[in-house]
Amino acid sequence: MRRGEIRTAVLAILLDGPGHGYDLIQRLEDKSGGWRPSPGSMYPTLQLLEDEDLVRSSDREGKKVFELTDAGRTEAERRVEEAGGAPWERERGMAPNRELRDAVGQAFVAVKQIGSVGSPSQIERAVGILKETRKQLYQILGED
């Protein structure tokens, strides 16, 4: 992992779900194949992200658990997209499906907008398109 990528790595790992500090360190180590951020870099990064309202914490079973806010999710997705994948994917050459992930992410943004501001008729049309798209994707898998 390149120096200075802890911020992006923490945001990206939180896309997978909430966790406490040591849990996040372990998940990063597992994803990266061995890179393990120190607690001395992890906890200040989490505190900074919380100060910036990108992450929020809550006490669960006596542990401080961190999760992305809506703004944090947006920032994490933006950083990963701009970088061409999560830091551990780029380092291990695991970004061959980046174009597919990007297309799905862009489609998700469009669907979210339709869900937020679309008329009932537009939402109904979007649902039909998504159902047909799903069928077509499975057809691709069924081809010889």
Image (cartoon, rainbow, N blue to C red):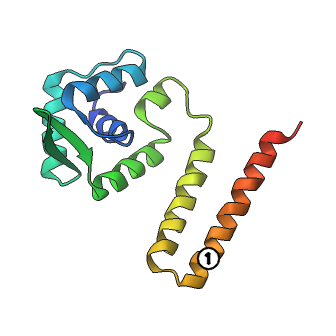
What's the residue at 48%, 39% (across, down)? Answer: 85
Note whether 108 is above or below 139 in the view shown.
Answer: below
Q: Give the percent coordinates (x, y) of residue 56.
A: 18, 49
Q: Nearer the viewer, residue 128 or 68?
A: 128
Q: Nearer the viewer, residue 38 or 139?
A: 139
- Please identify the residue farthest to the top as the structure is shown: 34
Type of residue at label 1? Answer: Glu
Q: Secondary structure at mark 1?
A: helix
Q: Quadrant of the C terminus?
A: top right
- 56 relative position to 87: left or right: left
Tally the marks: 1
Quadrant location of residue 74?
bottom left
What's the residue at 29%, 19% (across, down)? Answer: 36
Q: Give the percent coordinates (x, y) of residue 61.
A: 14, 33
- Please identify the residue farthest to the front as the structure is shown: 61
What's the residue at 61%, 38% (across, down)? Answer: 97
Q: Which residue is mark 1?
A: 124
Note whether 114 is above or below 89 in the view shown.
Answer: below
What's the residue at 26%, 54% (across, down)? Answer: 69
Q: Give the percent coordinates (x, y) of residue 91.
A: 46, 25
Q: Give the percent coordinates (x, y) of residue 96.
A: 62, 34
- 8 relative position to 21: left or right: right
Quadrant location of residue 42?
top left
Note whether 127 is above or below 76 in the view shown.
Answer: below
- 103 relative position to 13: left or right: right
Note whether 120 is above or below 137 in the view shown.
Answer: below
**How many residues crowd around disc 1 within 10 Å: few (fewer than 14), some, or many (20 or more)?**
few
